[in-house]
Amino acid sequence: MIHDNAFVDVALFLAILLPSVILHEIAHALTPGAKHGYTWKLKCIEIGGDGNTLGQEPNRRPEPAYALVYNGEVCKTYYRRPAKSTYAKLPGMYISSQPESRGRLQIIKVA
């Protein structure tokens, strides 16, 4: 059997990467439909993974792209463009502790 540098490099790469890949996939199996969301990330960390996806910088959360705003205060953030149904419901939405906010909420692009 011939062992060259390329083989050793691949073997080291798999030895380091494989355990995290396996934990990553087990977390998917334990959280059906959660994709790479918060529920999946918590489960991945709970079972010993790092909660990161391939190519993601550790412990770095992306900046929100949109925000739900009332009187200049951010009430909720969105990492993707909100669904059309969210925009359709917007006139009837309000903050539960502030019923006067009904019809005054706005979704703005922040990133």
Image (cartoon, rainbow, N blue to C red):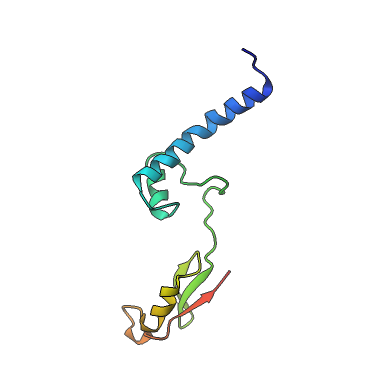
Where, quadrant-wise, is the C terminus in this rendering?
Answer: bottom right
Residue 106, image x, y percentages: 47, 80
Q: Which residue is at the front of the view, 21 or 98?
A: 21
Q: Which residue is at the front of the view, 107 or 45?
A: 107
User: Which residue is found at the position 36% from the left and 49% from the top?
Assistant: 32
Q: Could you say which quadrant of the image residue 6 lies in?
A: top right
- In this image, 64 relative to 47: left or right? right
Number of numbered discs on residues: 0
Whether residue 52 is situated above or below residue 111 in the rendered picture: above
Residue 55, image x, y percentages: 58, 46
Whether residue 20 is situated above or below residue 88 in the rendered picture: above
Q: Residue furthest top?
A: 1
User: Which residue is found at the position 47% from the left and 43% from the top?
Assistant: 50
Whether residue 23 is situated above or below residue 63 in the rendered picture: above
Q: Could you say which quadrant of the image residue 30 lies in?
A: top left
Residue 86, image x, y percentages: 41, 74
User: Which residue is found at the position 54% from the left and 47% from the top?
Assistant: 58
Residue 103, image x, y percentages: 39, 86
Q: Residue furthest right?
A: 5
- In this image, 25 relative to 108: left or right? left
Where, quadrant-wise, is the N terminus in this rendering?
Answer: top right
